[in-house]
Image (cartoon, rainbow, N blue to C red):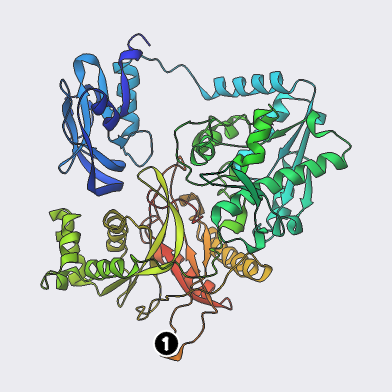
């Protein structure tokens, strides 16, 4: 620790500005994985190659380098790292802390051990003992009600509580909110009983469907007031959905406490909250500066109020998913539970894209024209157009060569879909368009993955790219099928989810995929616009996701991380479900797309 105060690893922009350099917003934004060139004589990058794959997420870049600093990393002509070796000051434009930066751990090791002089003596066992000690000190002889979903986070949390406290102090409750997978609650109860955890299962579907919460009204000229939200089954906003669900969990928990003749003020509420949950929710527990990406159900207003009162136990709040899994193994939990795919607290509620009307803004036509140029780039370069110059300005020569190659070999079309999904772009929340791609030929996945990386970089109003299975989409939908969280809609998604996950399990590749949300969208393809057929069907998206930290990740490439025949089998089975128009495959990494669509 002797030089820790002088050894700073922060984003290059802030450091450069503080020391007299300048920072400017560029026309090109880098959100995703890129190769950068490094000066590997710099202490920070010792032992690395001269070219490394890293995660970049920014819209601003260093322009003039501060005096005393030198450029030690570049992404094309954009500065990606600066250093002042004599002062032991290092600034990185990229994220060394995430798994998408292939050798990020080595960069952090160089910084912490060689530059800052730290030693690695803090272990998982230390952290386990600290968690147990903290629980004992906070709870004392009181009782704790733990909300137990059956996933690894809440189960590890419960195991820690049982290790720290007497069994009669811990009340384990599983709340079926009506948005569970097929037979999910039954499976959770059975799995927990095998672990010796007696869990009370509460069926609260009706309460959730009709749940409401209070939301702020922003008024510049008046004192901020509150409004009552719509009921959940009539809500289309993903943030409002999440807040209603989170607050309803607390209300149901209080009802359980009342039924047990306990006083709410005498019972702690325990949750398996992780660090990423707090970061994405912009909780003050994690950061005072973070942007809200999405409000997690375990960090809503009611939870924050209880937290301020000191009534919430969150032993995993400083852990990431991979660390929780290591801790779970240390606690003796079975591997099938520790490695289980996460299923979000709001469940299928955030996997239904609810909408009453299409999302079509004034930028819709122009963005569609840009996508046409990209999808047919080899022909477009022969026809000069102002939008072609925009595409060229946002792409490198290497990108353009790749586009020429792809569009010369494959007949593609790209188009906007009239819906919004949640993403993370430039470290901020985005709620933007989805780009669809269809093809006359069989999908060439490597080319599609390239386009999925390229398109959001050029079009900042797009945060997600999907491939649409089936024949080329001649007339992309411009309207939507009105969709809410009704029992019929949920049944359709529940069946699609069941079919897809069954096929993944039977294939033996479930362990290769970290998570696989199945999404229901309000999109009805293949309608002749002249016949004016109403939009009445919906389409399903398969979202494979590979990650270790759940802060960043990539979509699985069919033919590489998962066999293409497995994906095609999912598509075929989902298409048999009544009311399904098309099946799509999410090609997007995180960033710019979040793991879930909402």
Is 382 left, or right, of 507 in this rendering? left
Which quadrant of the view contains residue 96? top left
Mark 1 Cα shell of 10 Å, populated few (<14), some (14-19), many (≥20):
few
Residue under circle 1? 528
Percent coordinates x, y for residue 536 in the rendering: 55, 79
Q: Which of 28 and 577 is in front in this view?
A: 28
- Residue 549 vs 39, above or below: the answer is below
- Residue 94 vs 233, above or below: the answer is above
Is 249 left, or right, of 503 in this rendering? right
Which residue is located at x 15 percent, y 54 percent?
A: 398
Of all residues, the one furthest to the right in this rendering is: 261
Percent coordinates x, y for residue 347 in the rendering: 61, 54
Which quadrant of the view contains residue 116? top left
The answer to whether residue 290 is seen in the rendering is: yes
The answer to whether residue 544 is seen in the rendering is: no
Which residue is located at x 31 percent, y 17 percent?
A: 7
Q: Which of 127 and 84 is in front in this view?
A: 84
Of all residues, the one furthest to the bottom in this rendering is: 531
Q: Nearer the viewer, residue 339 or 555?
A: 555
Of helix, strand and loop, which one carries label 1?
A: loop
Is 516 left, or right, of 79 in this rendering? right
Of all residues, the one furthest to the front in this rendering is: 221
Which quadrant of the view contains residue 438? bottom left
Which residue is located at x 46 percent, y 75 percent?
A: 479
């Amino acid at each position: 620790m002797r030089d820790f105060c002088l050894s700073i690893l922060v984003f290059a922009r802030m450091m450069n500005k503080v020391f007299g350099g300048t920072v400017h917003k560029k026309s090109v934004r880098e959100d995703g994985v890129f190769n950068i060139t490094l000066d590997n004589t710099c202490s920070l990058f010792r032992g690395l190659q001269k070219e490394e794959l890293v995660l970049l997420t920014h819209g601003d870049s260093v322009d003039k380098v501060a005096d005393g600093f030198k450029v030690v990393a570049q992404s094309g002509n954009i500065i990606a790292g600066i250093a002042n070796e004599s002062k032991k000051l290092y600034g990185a434009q990229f994220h060394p802390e995430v798994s998408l930066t292939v050798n990020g751990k080595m960069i952090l090791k160089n910084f912490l051990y060689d530059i800052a002089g730290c030693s690695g003596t803090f272990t998982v066992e230390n952290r386990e003992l600290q968690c147990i000690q903290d629980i004992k000190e906070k709870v004392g002889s009181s009782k704790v009600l733990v909300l137990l979903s059956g996933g690894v986070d809440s189960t590890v949390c419960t195991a820690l509580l049982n290790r720290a406290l007497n069994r009669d102090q811990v009340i384990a409750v599983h709340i079926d909110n009506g948005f569970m997978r097929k037979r999910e609650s039954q499976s959770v109860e059975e799995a927990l009983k095998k672990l010796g955890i007696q869990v009370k299962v509460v069926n609260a579907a009706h309460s959730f469907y009709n749940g409401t919460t209070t939301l702020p009204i922003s008024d510049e000229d008046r004192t901020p007031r509150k409004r009552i939200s719509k009921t959940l089954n009539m809500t289309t906003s993903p943030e409002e959905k999440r807040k209603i669900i989170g607050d309803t969990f607390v209300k149901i928990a209080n009802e359980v406490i009342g039924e047990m003749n306990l006083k709410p003020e005498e019972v702690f509420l325990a949750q398996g909250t992780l660090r990423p949950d707090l970061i994405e929710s912009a909780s003050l527990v994690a950061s005072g500066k973070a942007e809200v990406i999405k409000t997690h159900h375990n960090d809503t207003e009611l939870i924050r109020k209880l937290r301020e009162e000191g009534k919430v136990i969150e032993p995993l709040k400083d852990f990431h998913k991979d660390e929780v899994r290591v801790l779970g193994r240390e606690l003796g939990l079975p591997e099938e539970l520790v490695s289980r795919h996460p299923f979000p607290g709001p469940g299928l509620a955030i996997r239904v894209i609810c909408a009453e009307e299409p999302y079509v803004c004034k930028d819709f036509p122009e963005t569609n024209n840009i996508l046409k140029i990209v999808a047919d780039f080899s022909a477009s370069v022969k026809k000069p157009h102002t939008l072609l110059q925009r595409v060229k300005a946002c792409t490198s020569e290497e990108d353009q060569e790749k586009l020429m190659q792809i569009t010369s070999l494959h007949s593609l079309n790209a188009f906007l879909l009239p819906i919004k999904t949640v993403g993370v772009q430039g470290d901020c929340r985005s709620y933007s368009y989805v780009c669809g791609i269809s093809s006359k030929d069989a999908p060439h996945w490597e080319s599609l993955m390239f386009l999925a990386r390229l398109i959001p970089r050029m079009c900042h109003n797009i945060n997600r790219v999907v491939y649409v299975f089936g024949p080329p989409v001649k007339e992309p939908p411009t309207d939507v099928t009105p969709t809410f969280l009704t029992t019929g809609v949920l049944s359709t998604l529940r069946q699609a989810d069941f079919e897809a996950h069954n096929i993944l399990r039977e294939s033996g590749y479930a362990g290769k995929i970290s998570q696989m949300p199945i999404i229901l969208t309000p999109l009805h393809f293949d309608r002749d616009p002249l016949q004016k057929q109403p939009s009445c069907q919906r389409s399903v998206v398969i979202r494979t996701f590979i990650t270790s930290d759940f802060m960043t990740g990539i979509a699985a490439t069919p033919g590489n991380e998962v066999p293409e025949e497995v994906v095609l089998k999912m598509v075929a089975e989902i298409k048999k479900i009544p009311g399904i128009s098309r099946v799509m495959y999410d090609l997007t990494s995180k960033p710019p797309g979040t793991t879930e669509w909402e």
